[in-house]
């Protein structure tokens, strides 16, 4: 990876992070692509982004539905417990 070294007095202390190195490589690759290839990649990314947004929204809706179900079940469970307590209290009073 010597092509990333810079001719500078600071080059010994300057190190490129792996993220930055990846960006540089992507820029070099993009320069070699034709306009048509770039347009195809761009349209593919737009389609992929749209699909991901749809999937995210569907998952968000599922989470809302499941949260509602859990809340209902917990409320029903607490109601049943309070009814059971009342029933047992009444049974104790009768005895």
Image (spheres, rainbow, N blue to C red):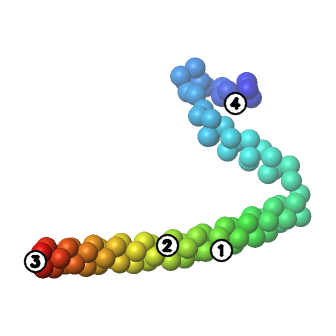
How many angstroms separate mark 1 from mark 4 (CA)? 40 Å
How packed mark 4 is, by other alpha carbons closer than 10 Å (few <14, some 14-19, many 20 or more), is few
Look at the image and tell me whether residue 64 can be seen.
no
Q: In the picture, which quadrant includes the N terminus?
A: top right
Residue 23 drawn at (x, y percent): 67, 44
Q: Quadrant of residue 24?
A: top right
Residue at 65 percent across and 74 percent down: it is 54
User: Disc 2, disc 3: CB below 8 Å?
Assistant: no
Name the residue at 53% across, 22% down.
13
Residue 54, disc: 1
Instruction: Give the distance between the C-alpha atoms of the residues marked 2 and 1, in whole angstroms.
Output: 18 Å
Upstream in sequence: badge 2 or badge 1: 1
User: In the rendered image, which quarter is residue 94 located in?
Assistant: bottom left
In this rendering, is residue 84 above or below 37?
A: below
- Residue at 39%, 78% in the rendered image: 72
In the rendered image, which residue does mark 4 sit on?
4
Q: Are marks 3 and 1 in contact (CB under 8 Å)?
A: no
Mark 3 or mark 1: which is in front?
3
Q: Which mark is residue 66?
A: 2
Left or right, 21 with respect to 69, comes to right
Instruction: Tell me the residue that label 3 is attached to.
Output: 93
Q: Earlier in the sequence, mark 3 or mark 1?
A: 1
**In the rendered structure, which disc, 2 or 4, sits on the residue that comes first in sequence?**
4
Q: Is residue 79 left or right of 63 when viewed as pictured?
A: left
Q: Secondary structure at mark 1?
A: helix
- Please state which of the two labelled residues, at mark 2 or mark 4, is closer to the viewer: 2
């Amino acid at each position: 990876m010597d092509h990333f070294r810079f001719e500078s007095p600071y080059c010994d202390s300057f190190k490129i992070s792996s993220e930055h190195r990846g960006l540089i490589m992507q820029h070099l690759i993009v320069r070699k692509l034709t306009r048509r290839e770039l347009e195809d990649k761009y349209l593919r990314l737009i389609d992929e982004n749209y699909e991901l947004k749809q999937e995210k929204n569907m998952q968000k809706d599922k989470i809302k539905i499941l949260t509602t179900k859990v809340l209902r079940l917990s409320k029903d469970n607490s109601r049943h417990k309070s009814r059971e307590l009342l029933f047992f209290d009444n049974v104790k009073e009768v005895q």
